[in-house]
Image: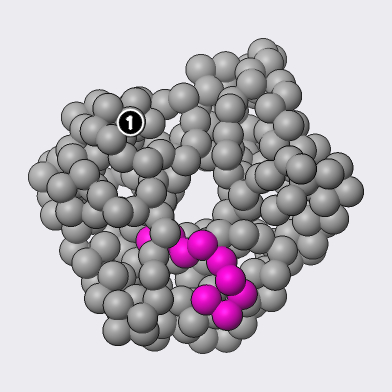
Amino acid sequence: MKYIDINCDLGEGKSLVDCEHDARIMPYISSCNIACGGHAGDESIIKQSLLNAKLNGLKIGAHPGYEDKANFGRVSLDISVEEVVTSIQKQLDFFLRISSKLNISIHHIKFHGALYNDLEKQPQLASKLAELIKYNYLSLKVYGLANGIFEKRCIALGIDFIAEGFMDRTYVSSGHLTPRSEENAVLTEQALSIAQAISLASNQGIKTSDGKVITPQVKTICLHGDNPEAITIAKALHFQLTSAGFLI
């Protein structure tokens, strides 16, 4: 049997009604990353998201990012590395206090948006956030970009790193994600994104936006929950992967 984890960024809505939408995705995935109040979410949304995820038997992750709800954490902030580390620790501690009160265990950490990308552009930032995890949250695994700088920093510190691929984002030949500022950064056609997911799960090559082929070695694949068609895509992805012999 072949195994693949499907993760989805959730808890990023503005109300408990949005949590209901998220809950409809949960039967078709195996892990989730819940916003920690920085780029999205608040205490009530975190609580409901945690309860829904537990009910669906998901591996649950914390999903911190830049504290910038106006831009959904998708813009790099001009702040020091120390300020980023302080903000992330605040978000993680807030999230873990809520999960602890609910007696819900947390499986992993996955960084969000621009911060996720900046970890690959700023080695010092990658090192400092890896150190934060090692000395404060070592019991948690980390989901992050396959074959990147942050993966190397985490592994060097003994952090359990789970390499991630993206079904609905394009890559450049370096293995990094195509910047969202470029037109071809997102795969909008469902058939193309599902085909890429199956290639990633099978460790087969995928075409990059600059005309090359790369083969990221991944253990988890991200499906973006903020896509208006996320539920439809999740159902189709689940069907196609299980039909191809994968256990999600």
Q: Splitting the image into 4 quarters, where does residue 17 fall?
A: bottom right
Decide if residue 24 is on the left or right side of residue 220: right
Crowding near the residue tagged with mark 1, few <14, some 14–19, many ≥20 C-alpha atoms within 10 Å: few
To which residue does mark 1 refer? 155
Q: Across the whole image, how many numbered discs are drawn on residues?
A: 1
Of residues 42 and 137, the one nearer the viewer is: 137
User: Is residue 76 visible to us here?
Assistant: yes
Picture coordinates of residue 50, whole percent (x, y): 46, 76
- Left or right: where 216 falls relative to 73: right
Task: Give the quarter of the image for residue 169.
Answer: top right
From this view, report whether residue 236 is shown above or below residue 172: below
184 in magenta:
no
Q: Is residue 222 above or below residue 103?
A: above
Can you say whether 221 is above or below 39 in the image? above
Q: Residue 58: within the magenta? A: yes
x and y percentages locating residue 130 in the rendered image = 24, 39
Indicate the position of residue 125 as horizontal and vertical percent values.
22, 35
Left or right of 31? Residue 88 is: left
Judged from the image, the secondary structure of the residue bearing numbered disc 1 is helix
Q: Residue at x 63, y 33 (%)?
A: 170
Using the rendered view, name the quadrant where residue 185 is placed.
top right
Please tell me which residue is depicted at 25% across the width and 76% down the height of the picture: 97
Tell me where the magenta segment starts and ends, as one range: 54-62
Residue drawn at point x = 38 percent, y = 49 percent: 141
Q: Residue furthest top?
A: 212
Q: Where residue 147 sits: x, y (%)?
A: 46, 25
User: Residue at left 59%, top 25%?
Assistant: 216
User: Nearest the camera: 34 or 218?
Assistant: 218
Q: Can residue 43 be spotted in the picture?
A: no
